[in-house]
Amino acid sequence: MTAFVRVVSQAPNQHMLVGFPGISATLPRLEGKVEIRPAKGVSASVAVSLVTVCLQRRESIHPSADSVTKKLGAPRRDLVDIVGKEMLLFRCHPNREYEEILAMDLPFVVFIPSGRGGEETARRIPPASLSLPRRTAETSYEIVVTLQQGQTEQHKFYFPVPISRFDTLSTFGMYNREESAERITDHLVRLVTTLPRWSYGPLDPISAYIRLIPNPEWLSKAKKVTINKITIGIDEEIIYNHEGDEPQKKVKTIVKHSQNVGVKMQDAGYFTSLGLIFPAKDLRDSDGVLPRGKQGFPMYNIGSFSTTGSLYKIEYYLTVKAHMTSAKDITSKQLIVVCPLDHAGCKQEMEAIELAAKDAAFINTENPMLPAPMIVRMNDPNGLHVIGMTMVGKTRKILIE
């Protein structure tokens, strides 16, 4: 008999993802239960030998998909691996090939790696779910339930689950330190850029303090330099197959701003502050309607963000360029972190993260407390009552309470 299998949360109206992936103190995990019922009829039994559950990650890249002329070039490359460990939920008695089951509810908890204990692949924090335009790069997750029925028949059931990362929130102290970068193109002028913080989200203001300092040893020549304009922008850099032999890099400027200066270099140098707004993506269509999101992917108010997978890596750089005469132009690239949430959204998450960390302190990862499984076998007394049936004489009837 074929089986109907679904995965639901352990409690009604509760998300299966508990904790915050990327923050080890919250012990990010998937809590749910596997429900198995007969696919046809209400009282036919299901043969069950083995039931397992795991979290599976699918990653794919197709760099040529964003070009019409290159779509027939290199094929799509895919990667599938298991995140964490596979969990055994049920195994029939060794002396039996299978057990006849009327209904089965099997609670489970799958811990998501949080980076503790080593740098090996199995302990890496998994990247967030993401799908770039035209699916040039994609990461998705799914809960996989494996149902063994007898010795030869095995079925796999897939249930998409979106996963986000919370270790790049702009409210964390590590991102609120000043970061400076210094560049010299020739011996006359030095460019120094300083960022007060370096994690940003959609519609967050970005400000940079810029200093052009003359070389005191060549001051007479440096004072002849004219600063024409200063350009600030954000470059998105996607590296496909970054861990392979032939990485492919694509760079795109997503926002840019220029300021005309037109002054000569002074003894004290030139100081200014430039800013721009990180662009956001409008989730609503032309009619102002919020469309249904793609299954298995969170709805981000941003095109993409900083992430690193096995097949691709996305990084963002704040680029400052000083255009000058009588001296070479100077360009400074400074790495920044882009978060899917804006600064206000990051602040709202902080209290929930603190509460999740307190709850996680009482959880034993080696032996987590789970609700008892509910297994109703064919020959159990009053087993038909669980599925709303009963025996009247030798006939099966609908149970009327």
Image: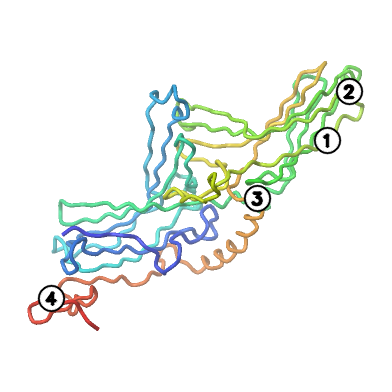
Kindly identify which residue carries mark 1: 272
Horizontal side of 144 relative to 221 (left or right) equals left
Kindly identify which residue carries mark 2: 264
Question: Looking at the rendered structure, which numbered label has been put on residue 396?
Answer: 4
Vertical side of 179 occupied by 10: above or below: below
The mark that comes first in sequence, 1 or 4, is 1
Horizontal side of 19 relative to 179 (left or right) equals left
Q: Nearer the viewer, residue 145 or 302?
A: 302
Q: Nearer the viewer, mark 1 or mark 4?
A: 4
Q: Nearer the viewer, residue 84 or 343?
A: 343
Q: Position of residue 317 (x, y in %)?
A: 64, 35
Q: Nearer the viewer, mark 3 or mark 4?
A: 4
Vertical side of 190 occupied by 80: above or below: below
At label 4, the amino acid type is: Arg
Going 38% across and 36% down the picture, which residue do you hit? 78
What's the image's color scheme?
Answer: rainbow
Task: Identify the image quadrant of residue 88.
Answer: bottom left
The mark that comes first in sequence, 2 or 4, is 2
At label 3, the amino acid type is: Ser
